C-alpha cells in the first residue's frame, strides 16, 4: 500500500511539473509583450496677450514652423491630435505617443513655437479612454 502511495504521489508531482511548463505561445507572447506607448498631452498658451489678433512677423513664422513640426510628427504616428481652442485664453493641445515622459518632454520642447518663446507649454500624461474618428470635418 505504501509503495502504491509513493507511485501515485510521484505521478502527481511529475504531472504538475509538466503541466506548469506547457504554456502556449500566445500566453508567453502576452506576458512578454511590451506595454503600449503611453500617451501625453501638452497644453500651449500664447505668451503675449495680443498674439492672437496681432501676431508679429517673427511669431507668425514660428507658429508656421510649429504647424509643420506637428504635421511631420502626425505623419510619423507620434502626434494623434492637435489644435487650439477658439475662445480666450486660446489654449492649444497636442496629444502624442511617446515611450516615456522624457521623450514626450523632448518633443514638446523641440516645438518651434515653444522653443521660440511664442507659447509656454505644460505636459501631462493622459489616459485615452475613448477615441473616436479623428478626421476633422470642414
Image (spheres, helix red, strand yellow):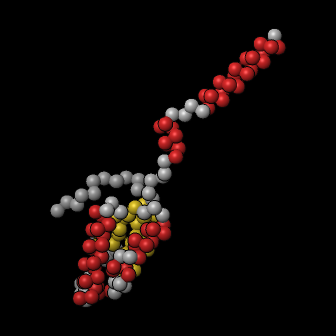
Q: Is residue 35 above or below residue 112?
A: above
Q: Is residue 127 above or below residue 41?
A: above
Residue 92, picture quadrant: bottom left
Front residue (pair 10, 92) = 10
Front residue (pair 135, 100) = 100
On the rendered image, what quadrant is the C terminus found in? bottom left
* Residue furthest left in the image: 138
Q: Is residue 70 above or below residue 16?
A: below
On the rendered image, what quadrant is the N terminus found in? top right
- Left or right: 122 as drawn, with respect to 83: right
Front residue (pair 49, 62) = 62
The residue that appears at 48% across and 69% down in the rendered structure is 102
Residue 137, position in %: x, y?
Answer: 19, 60
* Residue furthest top in the image: 1
Residue 61, picture quadrant: bottom left
Residue 136, position in %: x, y?
Answer: 23, 60
Is residue 89 in view? no
- Left or right: 7 as drawn, with respect to 39: right
- Left or right: 31 as drawn, with respect to 85: right
The residue that appears at 30% across and 70% down in the rendered structure is 70
Residue 26, position in %: x, y?
Answer: 47, 37
Amino acid at each position: 500500500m505504501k509503495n502504491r502511495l509513493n507511485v501515485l504521489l510521484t505521478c502527481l508531482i511529475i504531472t504538475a511539473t509538466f503541466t506548469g511548463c506547457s504554456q502556449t505561445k500566445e500566453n508567453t507572447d502576452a506576458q512578454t509583450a511590451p506595454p503600449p506607448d503611453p500617451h501625453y498631452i501638452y497644453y500651449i498658451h500664447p505668451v503675449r496677450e495680443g498674439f492672437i489678433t496681432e501676431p508679429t512677423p517673427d511669431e507668425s513664422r514660428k507658429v508656421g514652423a510649429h504647424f509643420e513640426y506637428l504635421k511631420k510628427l502626425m505623419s510619423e504616428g507620434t502626434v494623434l491630435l492637435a489644435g487650439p481652442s477658439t475662445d480666450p485664453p486660446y489654449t492649444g493641445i497636442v496629444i502624442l505617443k511617446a515611450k516615456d515622459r522624457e521623450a514626450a518632454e523632448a518633443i514638446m520642447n523641440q516645438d518651434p513655437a515653444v522653443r521660440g518663446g511664442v507659447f509656454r507649454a505644460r505636459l501631462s500624461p493622459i489616459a485615452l479612454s475613448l477615441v473616436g474618428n479623428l478626421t476633422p470635418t470642414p
